Amino acid sequence: MDVTTPTFEREVLEASKTTPVVADFWAPWCGPCRSLTPILEKVAKDYAGRVKLVKINSDDNQEISQAFGIRSIPNVIAFKDGKAVSQFMGAQPEGQVRAFFDKLLPSASELALARAEALYAGGKLDEAEAELAKVKFDPDYEARIEALKQGIAYARAGNSGPGVDELKAKLAANPADHEARLALAGLHAGGKRYREAMDELVEIVRRAKDFKEGEARKQLLNLFNLATDQPELVSEYRRKLASALH
């Protein structure tokens, strides 16, 4: 597919939010471009729609070329989630082009984590844990792993121990009972009542931020990851947490 300045945002930036896009910056006079383009097309065909390949004539679309610092061609840039993530310059052999494409696709661990999150959302805790066990450590999604582990723990906590009414009664009798407040937050979180859970955790931070080595703050950070579909709520409680800490 040939992309021009008017179609760049739709066909590259927006499209890359659902499928990785590889943009081949070329020009008709460029000899190395003529040898690289067939390799790119062959590899892209092998990926069967999992990666989108587009061509951009750098001479005819100088605004795009300048925006991405194209100084020599061929220059190949990969886009994911609306932004450039990697690139290479010059003609490359097929093996290196294929490795470039490979890095744009989710790893086995990423796929397992996504399945675990979907299973957790569906209340299938044992299956979610089984998928989570397949995930290899990676700092890029460590926070998601910890949040999911915490979410599973929350969901299971609701099946044992005191209930919401009993914990509320304990707190009415002694507002400084941080163990009861932490347990209440866990019950709320297990029921996905994230606002109520965050309220209780912020209150612990406000009253005793070092309680159990900052456990309330850690759980809040995990809740922020569990509640990514509620960005306004997360933003509100990030501000409340910052205020409570300082």
Image (cartoon, rainbow, N blue to C red):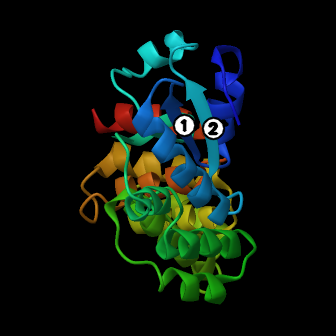
Near-viewer residue (93 or 51): 93
Q: Nearer the viewer, residue 150 or 171?
A: 150
Q: Amino acid at mark 1?
A: Ala
Identify the residue shown where x is 51% and y is 60%.
171
Dot 2: what SS?
strand
Label 1 sits on residue: 23
Question: Residue 86 occupies which quadrant of the picture?
Answer: top left
Whole-percent x, y for residue 32 in the image: 41, 38
Placement of 54 over or under 220, stated as above or below: above
Q: Quadrant of the C terminus?
A: top left
Q: Are marks 2 and 1 in contact (CB under 8 Å)?
A: yes
Please name the residue shown 60% across and 34% down the image. 55
**Residue pictured at 49% horizontal, 70% vertical:** 107
Q: Is residue 47 visible?
A: no
Q: Which mark is residue 54?
A: 2
Q: Please indicate, yes or no, whether residue 152 appears anywhere in the rendered image.
A: yes
Tell me the distance, in whole angstroms, between the alpha carbons under discs 2 and 1: 5 Å
Label 2: few (<14), some (14–19) or many (≥20) C-alpha neighbours in 10 Å: many
Amino acid on which the number 2 mark rests in the picture = Val
**Other residues around mark 1 within 10 Å, as few (<14) / some (14–19) / many (≥20):** many
Q: Say what secondary structure mark 1 lies in.
A: strand
Q: Is 242 displayed left or right of 24 in the figure?
A: left
Residue 193, horizontal then vertical, whole percent: 68, 56
Please name the residue shown 34% across and 62% down the image.
215
From this view, report whether residue 74 is shown above or below residue 154. above
Instruction: Check the image and report above or below for 155 versus 215.
Output: below
Looking at the rendered structure, the number of numbered marks drawn on it comes to 2
In depth, the one of 65 and 16 nearer the eye is 65
Where's residue 6, x and y in %? 70, 14
